[in-house]
Image (cartoon, grey):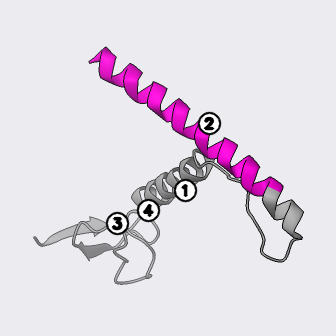
């Protein structure tokens, strides 16, 4: 589809293919900076949510002494069991809620 859009920087009309990253033919600025900023904010928000909702399990370093690795494995087992039980309860609640 052939369309044109007025550049917000220089005021000249440029060819626009409805792509947010299209640039002006005259000054090379982005024709739709609002959409580009919105997409970047959405991507940053998605990355922040992904980081916020991840579970940080205990990390076992192979360079640590054997007794530290042993106790960390026990702690990791408790963490995994706890996360499993909570997940089961949430699944049952969602199942019963319909």
Return the disc, 3 or 4, that comes first in the chain's sequence: 3
Where is mark 2, residue-wise? 82
The location of residue 97, given as percent across then percent down, is 32, 16
Residue 82 higher or lower than 1, as above or below: above
Where is mark 1, residue-wise? 47
**Label 4: few (<14), some (14–19) or many (≥20) C-alpha neighbours in 10 Å:** some
Report the residue at 78% width, 55% height from top: 72
Where is mark 4, residue-wise? 36
* Cα–Cα gap, marks 3 and 4: 6 Å
Q: Main secondary structure of the magenta part?
A: helix
The magenta-colored residue range is 71-98
Q: Quadrant of the C terminus?
A: top left
34 or 95, which lies in front?
95
- Kindly give the residue lying farthest to the left in the view shown: 1
**Label 3: few (<14), some (14–19) or many (≥20) C-alpha neighbours in 10 Å:** some
Disc sitting over residue 24 in the figure: none
Q: Secondary structure at mark 1?
A: helix
Image quarter of residue 16: bottom left
Report the residue at 31% width, 23% height from top: 95
- Front tag of 3 and 2: 2
Where is mark 3, residue-wise? 20
């Amino acid at each position: 589809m052939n369309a044109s859009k007025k550049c917000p920087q220089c005021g000249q009309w440029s060819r626009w293919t409805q792509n947010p990253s299209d640039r002006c033919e005259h000054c090379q600025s982005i024709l739709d900076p609002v959409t580009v900023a919105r997409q970047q904010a959405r991507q940053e928000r998605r990355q922040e949510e992904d980081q916020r909702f991840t579970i940080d399990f205990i990390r076992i370093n192979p360079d640590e002494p054997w007794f530290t690795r042993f106790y960390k494995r026990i702690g990791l087992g408790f963490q995994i069991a706890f996360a499993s039980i909570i997940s089961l309860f949430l699944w049952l609640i969602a199942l019963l809620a319909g």
